[in-house]
Each structure stands twice: as structure tokens, then as C-alpha cells.
Image: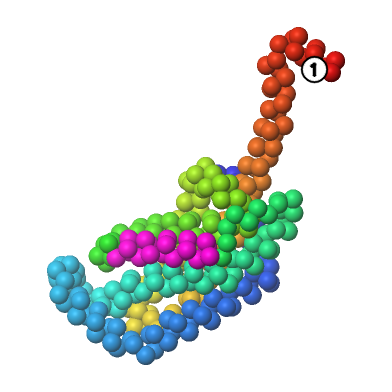
């Protein structure tokens, strides 16, 4: 637990560095161009499709009945936009992780090297491996999103499921990228197995931070209808949060790699001494004379 908080504090200090703030620019521009353009040209078609899907859903009729029972019939118009937001948010997050993994994380790792100057590079990962890891984890993430999507319309599950899913995705992607340059493939697998719980905890914490922009959207019906405009501002928040997560995972993983190598070096140094201890006294005298 101390390692998690230590890495958090160091990541927070690193995030304030001007170079880290500049790393938010390229992913923000790419994501804004992609999703802003999609919404600008396809908002009406997207909303029409969403209303068609919801009208054929039994779950929607239950939601409408619950709103009527609560005397909140005016919120019927909010259900379709909320459905679109719930569907788009994971897609936005997934694309943001891909952009950050490709364009920002390598620079983050180079920045972190200053804090770990004695850590040798083993180059156990690659850009191709990072892309495959990101795409594979993202595809599984989207499958889980689709399976659990009906629960996203229930307030309690809407607050719990997204952080858990995003936390798992962030943990898978960021851990690989943080260790790709310095750890061997074997070291990376060992660290992911040894520190799975704290790494997943960091991922869930980042997922909770990533829920903050979403809560801005759903906090007001007016903001939901302004979703295409609010999106541009909140995209930058997503980028900032995930750059911070790369720093957090980076500090945690590189320190854990240092500790792993130190343990193995100590064990290797102790092994010859243990072999001597296991020898018979006559063998030890023979070695000394030779």
C-alpha cells in the first residue's frame, strides 16, 4: 500500500512538469477531431438510431414506468441522450488509451528514466506488442461493455461498472507500456502476477477519476443536450487523467522492477556462499589449499 501512495505522490509531482502537460496536446487533438467530427455530422442519425433501439427495449418501458411513478415524466427525453453517452464514453476512453499509448507513453517513460538512472533497459516489449496488447484488451473491454450495457442505465451500476472496466483496461495497457522498455518479458509477467492487486487498484482509482467528466455530463439534463459541445472540454480532462495514470503506473512498475532485480541479485550473490556451507569440512579445506 505504501508503494501505491509513494508512486501516486511522485506521479503528481511529475504531472506538473511542463513537458507532461504538453503531452496532452496530440491525443486531445486526435480525439477531438475523431469524436467531434462524428458527432457534428452524425448527431441526428445517432439519436434517431438510439431512440429506435430504446423503443424496442423492455428495459426502457420499465424505466419510463419508474419515471412516471416518480412524477418525472419530463425526463423521458433524457433517456436516449443518456443511452448514447453511456455507449460513447467507453469508446472515447478506449480510443484515448490507444492515442496515449502510441503518442504519449514513450515520452512519459523517457521522463521517468531520470528517477531510475541505474535501471538497465532490457527491451522486453515493442511498439507492435504495445499495439497488440492495447487492441486485444480494448476488444475484450468493449465486449464486456456491450454485455453489461443494460445495467449502465441503472444508477447504482452506472457508478460501479465503468470504473471497474476502465480500471482493468488501464491496468492491462499501462502496465505493459510502463515495463516494455526496461523489463524483459519474463520480468514483466512476474511483476504483473506479483503485483496484480495493487496494479488493479491503481487502475480502478484511475477509472474513478475518469468517471468525473462523465458525472459532469449526467449531472444536468441541459448538459446532456449540450453533449457535443461539452465533449471537447472533457476530452482534455480524460487525456490529463490518463497521462497521470501513465506516470502513476510508471513510477510503481519501475520501482517494483528495481526491487525485483535487487532481490535476484542478492539471491545470486548468496548462492555461492550457500554452496560452500553445504560442503563437507574436508572439501572446504581442499578448496582453500587449491
Query: In x, y percent, where is residue 33?
Result: 48, 84
**Local SS, label 1:** helix
Kindly tell me whether residue 118 is visible in this rendering: yes
Left or right: 268 in relation to 252: right
- Seen from the viewer's position, the closer of residues 242 and 196 is 196
Query: In x, y percent, where is residue 259?
Result: 65, 42
- Seen from the viewer's position, the closer of residues 150 and 75 is 150
- Seen from the viewer's position, the closer of residues 260 and 63 is 260
Q: Quadrant of residue 178?
A: bottom right
Q: Which residue is mark 1?
A: 287
Query: In x, y percent, where is residue 117?
Result: 74, 54
Magenta stretch in the rendered image: 128-146
On whether residue 138 falls in the magenta region, the answer is yes
Quadrant showing the N terminus:
top right
Q: Quadrant of residue 48?
A: bottom left
Magenta part, dominant SS: helix
Left or right: 74 in relation to 178: left
Residue found 48% across the figure and 56% down from its top: 171
Residue found 65% across the figure and 37% down from its top: 264
Residue found 28% across the figure and 74% down from its top: 83
Quadrant showing the C terminus:
top right
- Neighbour class for label 1 at 10 Å: few (<14), some, many (≥20)? few
On whether residue 118 falls in the magenta region, the answer is no
Q: How many marks?
A: 1
Amino acid at each position: 500500500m505504501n508503494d501505491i501512495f509513494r508512486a501516486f505522490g511522485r506521479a503528481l509531482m511529475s504531472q506538473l512538469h511542463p513537458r507532461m502537460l504538453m503531452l496532452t496536446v496530440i491525443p486531445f487533438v486526435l480525439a477531438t477531431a475523431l469524436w467531434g467530427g462524428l458527432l457534428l455530422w452524425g448527431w441526428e442519425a445517432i439519436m434517431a438510431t438510439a431512440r429506435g433501439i430504446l423503443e424496442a427495449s423492455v428495459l426502457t418501458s420499465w424505466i419510463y414506468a419508474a419515471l412516471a411513478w416518480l412524477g418525472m415524466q419530463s425526463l423521458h427525453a433524457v433517456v436516449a441522450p443518456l443511452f448514447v453517452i453511456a455507449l460513447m464514453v467507453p469508446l472515447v476512453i478506449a480510443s484515448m488509451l490507444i492515442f496515449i499509448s502510441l503518442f504519449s507513453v514513450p515520452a512519459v517513460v523517457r521522463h521517468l528514466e531520470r528517477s531510475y538512472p541505474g535501471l538497465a533497459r532490457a527491451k522486453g516489449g515493442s511498439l507492435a506488442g504495445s499495439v497488440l496488447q492495447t487492441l486485444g484488451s480494448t476488444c475484450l473491454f468493449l465486449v464486456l461493455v456491450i454485455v453489461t450495457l443494460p445495467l449502465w442505465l441503472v444508477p447504482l451500476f452506472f457508478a460501479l461498472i465503468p470504473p471497474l472496466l476502465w480500471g482493468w483496461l488501464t491496468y492491462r495497457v499501462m502496465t505493459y507500456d510502463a515495463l516494455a522498455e526496461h523489463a524483459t518479458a519474463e520480468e514483466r509477467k512476474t511483476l504483473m502476477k506479483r503485483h496484480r492487486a495493487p496494479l488493479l487498484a491503481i487502475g480502478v482509482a484511475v477509472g474513478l477519476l475518469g468517471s468525473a467528466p462523465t458525472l459532469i455530463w449526467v449531472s444536468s439534463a441541459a448538459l446532456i443536450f449540450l453533449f457535443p459541445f461539452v465533449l471537447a472540454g472533457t476530452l482534455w480532462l480524460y487525456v490529463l487523467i490518463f497521462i497521470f495514470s501513465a506516470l502513476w503506473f510508471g513510477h510503481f512498475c519501475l520501482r517494483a522492477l528495481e526491487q525485483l532485480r535487487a532481490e535476484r541479485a542478492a539471491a545470486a550473490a548468496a548462492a555461492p556462499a550457500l554452496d560452500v556451507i553445504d560442503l563437507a569440512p574436508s572439501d572446504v579445506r581442499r578448496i582453500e589449499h587449491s
